[in-house]
Image (cartoon, rainbow, N blue to C red):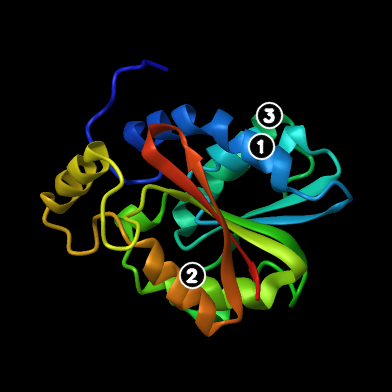
Amino acid sequence: MSDNKPPLDPHPLSEYVAWAGNRNREPLLGVLKEKLPKDPGRVLEMASGSGMHINYFAPHFDHLHFHPSDRDVEVFDNIKKLTTEHGNDNIADPVHLDLTNPETWFNAGTPRSFDTIFCINIFQVAPISIADGMMECAANLLSDDGILLIYGPFQVEGRFTTDSNKEFHDTLSSAGVEEWGLKDVADLKAAAAKHGLELKEIIDMPANNFSLIFGRQ
């Protein structure tokens, strides 16, 4: 894939999303190698999109079973195509999980059935209101000592941590879509607290992104 940055396009099958995913997958893999359980277990990805991340990560964790999910069922064929092409037999078929619709939250499994849940690059193009659904869903699905990992660019306590993040926020905002823009970690913490979760760790990532690690209080 070219190193040239494609035009901004948040569609999960766009060249831009593929470019961004290719750039961040190695640093994310490093975090997952540290945070994922060493014993057999189950891992859920929320908002899997094209499936590029889950299919890149899964071969590194033969002892874990990965479960992709997304609100948009139109991406399911691409997820399954990548799974077949990569020969990843530890990835389940994708399931419909809409963070605004509680009726879908247990499509992926039963309460306390996941050791880890991760979600990559969703909040800059999603309304902050989905944080409440994400945290409630995670609180239901995570095991007692499970974690929720949220990756992406964020504001921290009402400020941009770098000029480039401010520029990215302004670019997103200029598109005229109300929910586009960098959200604040404080809002995620507030949503988590409502459902018995708390921010355990903030990991600085390349390109001025963060991995936010939530667990039970």
Q: Which mark is residue 98?
A: 2
Residue type at numbered disc 3: His
On screen, 206 above or below 213? above
Q: Tell me: 70 left or right of 165.
A: right
Which residue is depicted at the point 47% across and 79% down? 101
- Viewer-proximal residue among 48 and 126: 126
Residue type at numbered disc 2: Asp
Q: CA distance from mark 1 to mark 3?
A: 11 Å
Residue 137 picture location, percent across and down: 58, 75
Q: Is residue 30 visible?
A: yes
- Would you identify the image quadrant in which residue 18 lies? top left
**Labels 2, 1: front one:** 1
Whether the residues at callouts 1 and 3 have beta carbons within 8 Å, the answer is no
Which residue is depicted at the point 31% across and 67% down? 127
Q: Which mark is residue 86?
A: 3
Q: CA distance from mark 2 to mark 1?
A: 23 Å
Under circle 3, the secondary element is: helix
Which residue is depicted at the point 37% across and 38% down? 208
Which residue position holds label 1?
Answer: 57
First in sequence: mark 2 vs mark 3: 3
Residue 203 picture location, percent across and down: 53, 46
On screen, 166 above or below 148? above
First in sequence: mark 1 vs mark 3: 1
Under circle 2, the secondary element is: loop
Residue type at numbered disc 1: Phe
On screen, 193 above or below 33? below
